[in-house]
Amino acid sequence: MDPLSRYDTLVDDPTAFHAACKRPLPSVVRVNEIKATPGRVQRAFEEAGVEFEPVGWHNGLFRLGADESPGNSWPFVHGWVYGQEEVSTVPAIALDPQPGERVLDCCAAPGSKTTQLAARMNDRGLLVGNDNNLGRLSALRSNAERCGVTNLIVTRQDARNFSLKSFSQTPFDRVLVDVPCSCEGTVRKNPDAVESWSLDHVEGIAGVQKGILGRSLEVTRPGGTVVYSTCTFAPEENEAVLQHAIENHDCELVAFDLSLRSVPGVTEWNGETYDDSMRRAKRIYPHHNDTGGFFCAKLEVGQ
C-alpha cells in the first residue's frame, strides 16, 4: 500500500493528491536579493535564453522550463539565484527576520533557507547557521559565499543541545527550526522518500524533532519568534511535535499570512487530539499549488 494513502482523510481530493505526488516537480529558483533584483534576473534569463515564468504568489521566484537546470546559467554561478523548491521558501517568510536582529537557523545546511534569511535581513545583524553534519556544513559555507552572505556564523552542534556559550549567553530574537523529517512531501523529486518509509522512522524522528524544537524555544528571548517546519504530511511529526512544545514550554502558536494556498493544521489524528491553536499552522499539499508538500507553524515565546 502507498504510505501516502494514510492521509486520504486529511486531504480534500485524494485522487488529485496522489496524482500530483506522482508528477515531476517543477524546477524553481529564488532571486538572491543580496546580489540582484527580480527584474535583473529576468533580463539576465532572457539574454541567456533561459526558459522561465514568474511564480504568481512570490515575485522573487521563477519556475524554469522543463529542460532547464538551475545550475546551468551564469546568474546561478554568480549567486544571483538559488535553486530552491517553491514551498521551501515559506519558513523564512513566516519567520520574517529584520535587519540587525539575532537569528538562528538551527538545522541550516545546505543553506537554501539560511541564504534566504540573510537576504531578508539585508545581510545585517547576526545570523547563525548550525548543523551537526560536517559534509553538509561544507555545502552551507560554499552556498553562503556564492550568494555574498557576510553576516553568517557557521556552527556545528547537535541542535537538541545548542549552547549559547559562544554567544555571551544572549538569546536569539528569532529561530528557524526546519527539522530533519521523513520527507514524504519531497516524493515528487525523491521517490525513495516513500519507498523507504516506515512508521517506526516517523515515530523515531518525531522524538528528535521534539528535542530540537524544545531547545530552540529555550534559546529564544521572551517575546521572540520560532518557526517550525517540515516537508512531511505526518501529524506525528507536525501537530504532535507542536503539542509537546506548548505543553512543556511557555509558548503559543500564532497566525501568519501566506499567499500560497494552504489548509489549517489538524486537531485530531488516529485517536489523538491536539490543541485548537493547531489550526494556525499551515499544511501545503502538492495538488493545490503544483509544489511539494510542506508544513509550517509560527510560535511566540512567552514574555
Image (tube, grey):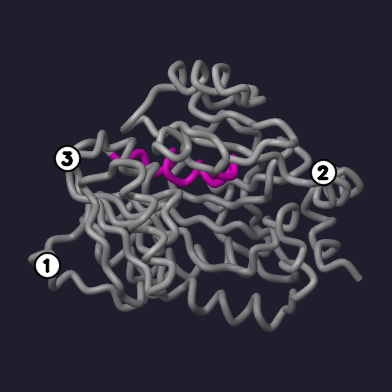
* Residue 303 appearing in the image: no
> Could you classify mark 3 by the number of other residues whose Cα lies within 10 Å: few (under 14), some (14-19), or many (20 or more)?
some
Image height check: is 40 above or below 156? above
Sequence-first tag of 3 and 1: 3
Label 2 with label 1: CB-CB less than 8 Å: no
> 119 and 19: which one is in front?
119
Which residue is painted at 82% across and 45% down in the image? Answer: 20
Kindly indicate the quadrant of the structure image that contains residue 3. Answer: bottom right
Mark 2: amino acid: Asp
Q: Amino acid at mark 3?
A: Gly
Residue position for label 3:
100
- Specify the label residue 12 is tagged with: 2
Measuring from the top left, give residue 300's x and y in whole percent. 34, 51
Instruction: Provide the residue span drawn in magenta.
Output: 84-97
Q: Nearer the viewer, residue 281 or 117?
A: 117
Q: Is residue 106 inside the magenta stretch? A: no
Q: Residue at x 88, y 47 (%)?
A: 19
Instruction: Estimate the spatial distance between the alpha carbons at disc 2 and disc 1, rounded to whole Å.
Output: 46 Å
The picture places residue 14, in percent across and down from the top left corner, at 87, 49
